[in-house]
């Protein structure tokens, strides 16, 4: 690494602070809003910039209100739907993508490029173009407003990302080790379980995080293919939150719900940032 | 010599076994297809089949509120869409949002990528913090910015030089300002990470050599960094452009398309789900699909974006 002048270091440090501020400031803002009481959530003429930003009387009431009525409340059922649908979609997507990625990384067969190219085309596919037909199909198949009705589009639309990530990871695995273990007396199953599985797990984990984030984030399918809390996920439920009266938007409650659905993402990012970056860029670097 | 003769002998031995070998190749081929089949079927089920179905629907008059009036009407839905001023307003809005946000994201993303690349310490901190906007649910990000700009809850109107009662969502251009801000905030990190990956593939020696030859920082950036990063840049731009063209969540949350801020995806949703007009809505869907196809072809042919994975075995 080259040496730098103190000036350069200061500019660099400033840039660093600006970037961190850029990324975190809106998050702090929504947390602040979620802690405000009904009395302070709306702006008072004299409170000024900082008065608006920092809650003067922080409270967890908005969070309690979300869970107050349990499954009949506005938030708990959508939260369970979100978690369940995202987890099941992730699990199935990773199993299907692992099969395909293993075949593409290790086996010789015609049509391999077609599968990769097709996956790429689907990554570019506009979801809105499938919403109408899926709406119609799901209604006649009884999948409208059910968990599988959302799980199917989520897992299918996240397969390209999962396949690309996994192919990149699987290509890096030294598969010869498997044979080496067998030469050393391991059975094929032992060789697979003790040698290959530990090497493949990080890649599958990375792909799983990306798929989960995708399913967790979706809004278009969630509002188009559901009609009730039977399967409505949090992003869709948020759009239909109502306040005490029909005409007030429940700002603080939406903010509290927003904070809750952001927590798992922040936890993932803090723990797995290296893997997420590796996964996100695996397909694009070679491009 | 020894080494060379061994495979030769092995080959001789294998000669009579050619059939079993091709048998093995054939079973490998079968296994490959078998393993790919579930994923391929799942992907086709929600894309290829629906788009064909959407095309079929788009040729019919089909309003679910009046299902008895269903009939084949040829291309008349397309004529209706393409002659309506709403469609063209929405196309202009969508292209405007796409162009402005992708441009800002690219410049900002490049700056963040360069910053991260030159980091001695703190790279992890920056990377973690930029991943947070990427991971945040788009609807949540949209609400966050909406509340920040809303006159009765937000801090923005409390800033100096901003009128206290400025209604950001009451006017087309100020509403787009907030919508684009939310889009840019959330997706710049993604671009920055893709560009950073491209940056790390550039050999540092090139910069040293250019320095020795007297090139300044600006020249080094335009003559070395940009040309060598072209593949990474084009892939990042292609994906972001297609993604921005589908803009839906932010607009739905902030304005629902009022004050002329509707995007083509919102139009499709309104026709299909809100008005249950599957015929007209499907025509919109097919047109959006064709627009996305055109953008992709433009990138691949026009800019020579190499498709990721094309060079892979």
Image (cartoon, coloured by chain):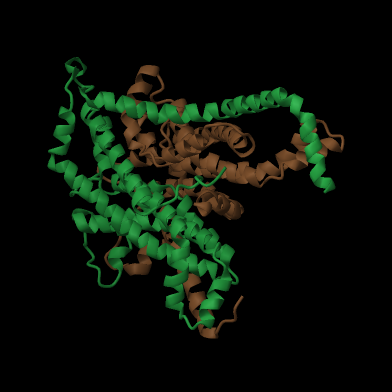
Spot the residue most to the top: B68
Residue B16, given in percent of the width and then of the height, sits at 76, 24
Left or right placement of residue B231 versus residue B93 in this view: right
Q: Position of residue A147 (x, y in %)?
A: 46, 27
Residue for point 34% across, 32% down: A131
Name the side, left or right, on which B255 lies relative to A180.
left
Which residue is more in the foreground, B39 or B17?
Answer: B17
On screen, B111 above or below B131? Answer: below
Chain drawn green in the picture: B
Rendered brown, the chain in question is: A
Residue in view at x 44 percent, y 66 percent: B226
Kindly indicate the quadrant of the structure image that contains residue A130.
Answer: top left
The image shows residue B71 at horizontal and vertical percentages of 18, 17
Nearer the observer, A242 or B228: B228
Residue at image position (30%, 27%) is B54
In the rendered image, which quarter contains the C terminus of chain B?
Answer: top right
């Amino acid at each position: 690494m080259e040496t730098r002048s103190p000036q350069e270091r200061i500019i660099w440090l400033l840039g660093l602070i600006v970037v961190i501020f850029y990324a975190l400031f809106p998050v702090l803002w929504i947390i602040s809003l979620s802690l405000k009481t009904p009395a302070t959530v709306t702006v008072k003429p004299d409170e000024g910039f900082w008065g608006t930003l920092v809650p003067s009387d922080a409270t967890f009431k908005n969070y309690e209100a979300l869970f107050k009525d349990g499954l009949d409340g506005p938030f708990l059922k959508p939260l369970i739907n979100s978690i369940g649908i995202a987890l099941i979609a992730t699990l199935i997507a990773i199993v299907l993508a692992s099969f395909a990625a293993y075949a593409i990384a290790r086996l010789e067969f015609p049509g391999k490029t077609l599968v990769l190219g097709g996956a790429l085309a689907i990554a570019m596919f506009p979801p809105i173009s499938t919403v109408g037909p899926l709406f119609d199909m799901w209604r006649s198949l009884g999948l409208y407003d059910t968990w599988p009705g959302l799980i199917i589009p989520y897992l299918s639309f996240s397969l390209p990302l999962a396949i690309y990530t996994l192919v990149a990871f699987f290509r890096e695995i030294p598969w010869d080790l498997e044979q080496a273990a067998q030469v050393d007396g391991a059975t094929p199953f032992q060789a697979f379980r003790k040698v290959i599985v530990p090497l493949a797990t990080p890649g599958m984990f990375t792909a799983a995080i990306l798929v989960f984030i995708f399913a967790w984030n979706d809004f278009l399918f969630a509002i188009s293919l559901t009609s009730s809390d039977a399967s409505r996920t949090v992003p869709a439920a948020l759009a239909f939150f109502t306040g005490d009266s029909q005409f007030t938007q429940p700002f603080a409650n939406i903010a509290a719900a927003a904070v809750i659905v952001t927590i798992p993402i922040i936890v993932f990012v803090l723990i797995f940032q290296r893997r997420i970056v590796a996964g996100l860029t695996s397909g694009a670097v070679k491009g | 010599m020894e080494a060379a003769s061994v495979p030769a002998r092995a080959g001789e031995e294998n000669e009579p076994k050619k059939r079993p070998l091709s048998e093995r190749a054939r079973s490998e081929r079968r296994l490959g297809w078998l393993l790919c089949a579930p994923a391929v079927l799942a992907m086709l089920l929600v894309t290829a089949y629906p788009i064909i179905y959407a095309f079929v629907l788009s040729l019919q008059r089909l309003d679910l509120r009046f299902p008895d009036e269903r009939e084949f009407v040829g291309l008349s839905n397309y004529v209706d869409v393409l002659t309506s001023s709403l469609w063209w307003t929405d196309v202009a809005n969508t292209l405007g949002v796409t162009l402005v946000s992708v441009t800002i994201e690219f410049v900002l993303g490049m700056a963040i990528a360069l910053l991260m690349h030159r980091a001695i310490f703190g790279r992890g901190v920056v990377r973690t913090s930029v991943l947070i906007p990427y991971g945040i649910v788009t609807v949540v990000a949209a609400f966050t910015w909406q509340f920040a700009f809303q006159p009765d809850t937000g801090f923005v109107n409390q800033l100096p030089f901003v009128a206290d009662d400025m209604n950001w969502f009451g006017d087309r251009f100020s509403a787009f300002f907030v919508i684009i801000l939310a889009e840019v905030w959330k997706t710049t990190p993604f671009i920055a990470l893709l560009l950073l990956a491209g940056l790390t593939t550039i050999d540092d020696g090139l910069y040293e050599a250019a320095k020795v030859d007297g090139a300044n920082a600006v020249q080094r950036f335009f003559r070395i960094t940009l040309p060598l990063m072209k593949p990474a840049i084009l892939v990042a731009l292609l994906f972001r452009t297609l993604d921005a063209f589908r803009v839906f969540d932010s607009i739905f949350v902030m304005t629902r398309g009022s004050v002329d801020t509707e995007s083509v995806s919102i139009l499709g949703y309104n026709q299909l789900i809100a008005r249950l007009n599957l015929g007209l809505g499907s025509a919109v869907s097919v047109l959006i699909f064709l627009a996305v196809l055109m953008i992709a072809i433009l990138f691949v042919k026009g800019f020579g974006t190499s498709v990721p994975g094309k060079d892979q075995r």
